[in-house]
Image (spheres, helix red, strand yellow):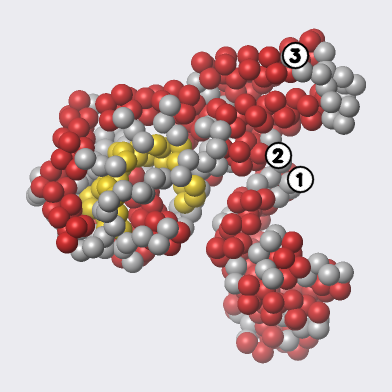
Amino acid sequence: MFEALSQRFEALFKRLSGHGRITERNIEDALREVRLALLEADVNLKVVRDFVEHVRQKALGQKVLDSLTPEQHFIKFVYDELRQAMGGQAHPLDLKFKPPVKLLLAGLQGSGKTTSAAKLARWLKLEMGRHPILASTDVYRPAAIEQLRVLGAQIGVPVLDANEQEDPLEIASRALAQAEKGGHDVLILDTAGRLQIDEEMMEELAKLKALVQPHHVLLVVDAMTGQKAANVAKGFHERLNLSGVVLTKLDSDARGGAALSIRYVTGAPILFAAIGEKLEAFEVFHPDRIASRILGMGDVLTLIERVQRDYDLAQAKQLERKLRKNEFTIEDFAAQLEAINKMGSLGELLGMIPGLRKLAEHADSPQAQRELVRIKAIIDSMTVQERRNHLIINGSRRARIAAGAGVSVSDVNRFLKQFEQTRKMMKKIAKMGGSSRGFIRGLGLGG
């Protein structure tokens, strides 16, 4: 996420760290680098100008604290401005209305609108305890209604039965009636998009808004389109008065132009971010956390929330017991890999830990992914007894495992050696009081 921007800032801060104090000269040099970094990140020009000017005023208007190096001093100013550019703080979706709360999703074709509708429904159901219903008025894109129906089935959320021969306004009217009749407290209405903003699409959206009278109009935009996303948002905002924005493909955005431009250009906050293809890859947008990740300072709070959401504390305690008794098995190792996979990409998770951004850059490389696939194939080729006691794996067993996994015997030998090293390391951590349970406790998750 925002790798290019992060690398530019990292290089800048390293150069600043060589100075004993902040002067007007080195501040101007640093600000030139900031300006270039933001422009390369495809940030809106007006945002860049204001951003640089605000940092300049702060940097030259305050004395350097004795406890801070020039690098740390400047980082704080850049962090504060990054956070403010993206909205300052998270903006919760206001659901305090008489049910059903009506949410209308708009956006261009290809922005991920239909998938985002399902992700939002899942989030409302699991995180907010709501009982949503989904409906699609997209009668133009082939299989759009069917796509929503399939996604709804995957997350256990009902989808209004509709077809491409109906009028969008008729579908919306039936969706309202069904939401009220079925006792649903949230209605999420997916709408049709176009490849670009046009009058026909806007007119239909205006009619839908007038009919449904939604409590919130949410725009779904593709983060990878950079400041174009901000211009699209501005066009929708002028006609529909957006409540907020959902940024999709944020995990694939190496630049950051959309995230840093949308709030400034439209005034509408970024409410949610889709950070992967999985339906659970959907989170509240936290400007402070994103700013921290851009500057290589990690995002421990989001990591904690992922662990809380996806990691079974009972399993963590059982794992601790096994570690202390040196009973950690290949079966346990496989379970840990699966748990990490549920939490997101390895690179993204490592990027949330301060100081590990460099390692995170290569964690999801094709080579690393191939190695993980190879390891999984080796484990899958083992019997239950072999996974639970790797010491019984002799020469003939290694040959059989290699044949079953489609790898060489040397690959199997290398994995077993790596596993033994991992086992020894985890045993040492457990003895030092840094077991999985201690780690969970350290994150504030366990008793």
Q: Secondary structure at mark 2?
A: loop
| Of the image marks 3 and 1, the number of the one nearer the N terminus | 3
Instruction: Locate residue 37, reporting x and y percent.
Output: 64, 23
Q: Is residue 188 left or right of residue 275?
A: left
Residue drawn 41% across the image and 25% down it = 266
Residue type at the position of mark 2: Gly
Q: Earlier in the sequence, mark 3 or mark 2?
A: 3
Residue 195's image quarter? top left
Q: Residues within 10 Å of mark 1 (few under 14, many from 20)?
A: few
Residue 406 visible in the picture: no
Three-letter code, disc 1? Gly
Q: Position of residue 271 (x, y in %)?
A: 45, 41
For label 3, the residue is 60
Q: CA distance from mark 3 to mark 1?
A: 29 Å
Q: Are marks 2 and 1 in contact (CB under 8 Å)?
A: yes
Mark 3 or 1, which is nearer the eye?
Answer: 3
What's under tag 3, amino acid-wise?
A: Leu
